Image (tube, helix red, strand yellow):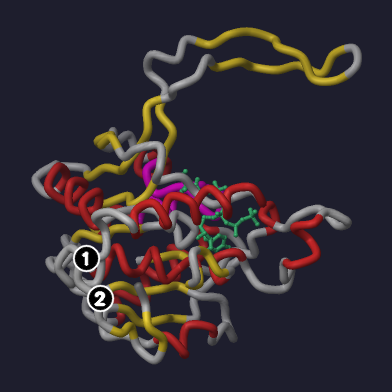
Amino acid sequence: MVPCAGMGLRAVPPAATPAAASADPALPKQYHPVAGHPMVMHTLAAFAGVSRLLGTLVAVAPGDHFLNAYAHPTFFTVECGGPTRADTVLGGLRALVARGALPDDWVLVHDAARCLVTSRQIDTLIDTCQHDAVGGLLAHKLADTLKTSIDGPGGVRVASTVDRSDKWLAQTPQMFRMAPLRAAIEHVGSGATDEASAMEAMGLHPRLVPGGAQNFKVTYPDDFALAAAVLAQRAHGATLDRFGGARGQVAPAYGKKTMF
Ligand SMILES: Nc1ccn([C@@H]2O[C@H](COP(=O)(O)OP(=O)(O)OP(=O)(O)O)[C@@H](O)[C@H]2O)c(=O)n1
Ligand SMILES: C[C@](O)(CO)[C@H](O)COP(=O)(O)O
């Protein structure tokens, strides 16, 4: 399931900057062009490359028909977006149950805005978690020295340096069984910022599976250029097989638009 109903407010460039002149603030970030395609299409291409997935539910905001022009058998949209990401995910889980998902079925939840995830990373997560009692998530071990802050003279200042040896940045996909995940999010409510934290609130310890720095979430205006650069570098290399074409071949048409 791909939650795709956010507004992307942090990605809107400040007014009066060169980036603001060409940006469409009314278009949520997941639909902004990145390397020639709407951002979420790169995300969906990675999932389309994982053959053991039954399909992908894209949870969009009510009235959002953006993806109608990109229809493809590997995904379908449901207008179940809510005010927070957790609300959107819950709507998606209920929609999956309505379509026959069973309590023990696994579901992977992945941000539309993490458009650099690869089919290989998704496969690694599944391989690692499919026999786990809880499930797990891709995550990236902290690479920098970690500070806490206080407001001080002249602005924000360092309060302390924190031991980072056990610190990870949570990424997606996050993979759990349908019934426990739904129960956990219903228990924790709209404030859960990811699926793992809802499971943690139930006393569980999801598995951490190394993802990689490139699986970042496009959040701020500068992130678009970084994502485009990574995709451009991959297009010169090894990832033209995202839609099932072999390396070096031209990939098939993706619905009414052509991808890659
Ligand atoms: N009510 C919401 C909020 C977020 N998301 C989705 O959750 C993912 C992660 O959220 P984030 O990147 O933080 O997106 P936004 O909420 O859109 O960003 P912002 O907080 O800057 O507005 C995104 O794919 C976003 O579309 C969602 O489906 N429904
Ligand atoms: C789920 C998530 O991608 C994990 O890092 C992230 O928490 C979602 O973004 P938000 O800013 O917390 O909504």
| Label 1 environment density (alpha carbons within 10 Å; few <14, some 14–19, many ≥20) | many
Ligand 1's quadrant is: bottom right
What's the CA distance linking mark 1 and mark 2? 7 Å
Q: Secondary structure at mark 2?
A: loop
Secondary structure of the residue carrying tag 1 is loop
Task: Give 150 or 250, whichever is nearer the viewer.
Answer: 250
Residue 5: quadrant of the picture: bottom right
Q: Is mark 1 within 8 Å of ligand 1?
A: no
Question: Which span of residues is magenta-colored?
Answer: 183-196
Give the side of residue 150 with respect to residue 96, left or right: right
Residue 78 in the figure: left or right of residue 104: right
**Which amino acid, mark 1?**
Asp
The circle on residue 251 is: 2
Q: Position of residue 80 (x, y in %)?
A: 49, 76
Q: Residues within 10 Å of mark 2 (few under 14, many from 20)?
A: some
Q: Which residue is mark 1?
A: 241
Residue at 33% x, 52% y is: 173
Q: Which of the two labelled residues, at mark 1 and mark 2, occupies the earlier sequence position?
A: 1
Q: Is residue 15 left or right of residue 216?
A: right
Q: Is residue 176 positioned above or below 196 on the image? A: below
* Viewer-proximal residue among 90 and 121: 121
- Vertical side of 1 occupied by 70: above or below: below
Q: Is residue 90 or residue 2 the one in the foreground?
A: 2
Residue 191: within the magenta?
yes
Contact between labelled residues 2 and 1, with CB atoms less than 8 Å apart: yes
